[in-house]
Image (cartoon, rainbow, N blue to C red):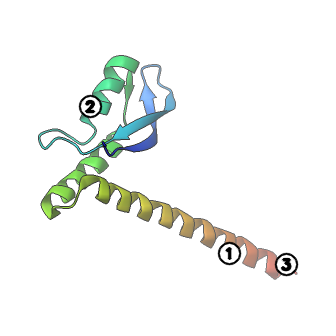
Amino acid sequence: MINIRKFVIDCVFSDGNKHPVNLYVGEPAIDSPALYFQSKWLSEKKGGMIPKEVIESFDKIKKISVENKIPFLELVDFVIEEINSSKSLKKDAERSFEISKSDKKL
């Protein structure tokens, strides 16, 4: 069984517009960037580009994975979990702020 992860990323297309694209990431080859094949496919077949910061982020994860002998997808899962947790904390803090503002009006 092949392990892959699906991500939806807003990518820029030749018409200048951004559209969400499903990207599928597996264990990258040692000698290629983490999103190389997805980026190549999107560019050649659909005229789109994965944002540079997304490509760089996955390449950093790959580098850390290799240096620390951690499976790439395990590290990707950890990073995504941390991002989601941070978003949740931010949303909770914003809700708390709104509630505290409405309490002061009472």
Residue 54 lies, in percent from the top left, at 35, 44
Could you say which disc has been placed on residue 105 in the image?
3
Q: Position of residue 104 (x, y in %)?
A: 80, 81
Do residues under tags 2 and 3 come within 8 Å of each other at their CB atoms?
no
Residue found at x 81% / y 80%: 103
Residue linked to disc 2:
37
**Dots 3, 1 in contact, CB < 8 A:** no
**Residue sitting at x 61%, y 72%:** 93
Residue toward you, 15 or 77: 77
Of badges 1 and 2, nearer the viewer stands: 2
Question: What amino acid is at disc 1?
Answer: Ser
For the residues marked 3 and 1, what is the alpha-carbon distance in whole angstroms?
15 Å
**Image quadrant assignment for residue 99:** bottom right
Disc 2 residue crowd, few under 14, some 14–19, many 20+, Cα 10 Å: some
Q: Which mark is residue 42?
A: none
**Identity of the amino acid at label 2?**
Phe
- Say which residue appears at 42% left-offset and 20% top-offset: 14
> In front here: 100 or 79?
79
Q: Look at mark 1 in the image and give the residue it sits on.
A: 96
Circle 3 or circle 1, nearest the eye: 1
Give whichever of discs 3 and 1 has the lower sequence position. Answer: 1
- Residue 35, percent from left and from top: 28, 38
Looking at the image, is mark 2 or mark 3 earlier in the sequence? Answer: 2
**Going by the image, does 63 lie left or right of 97?**
left
- Assign the C terminus to one quadrant of the image: bottom right
Q: Secondary structure at mark 1?
A: helix
When asked about the image quadrant of residue 92, the answer is bottom right
Amino acid marked by disc 3: Lys
- Measured along the vertical axis of the image, is residue 28 above or below residue 104? above
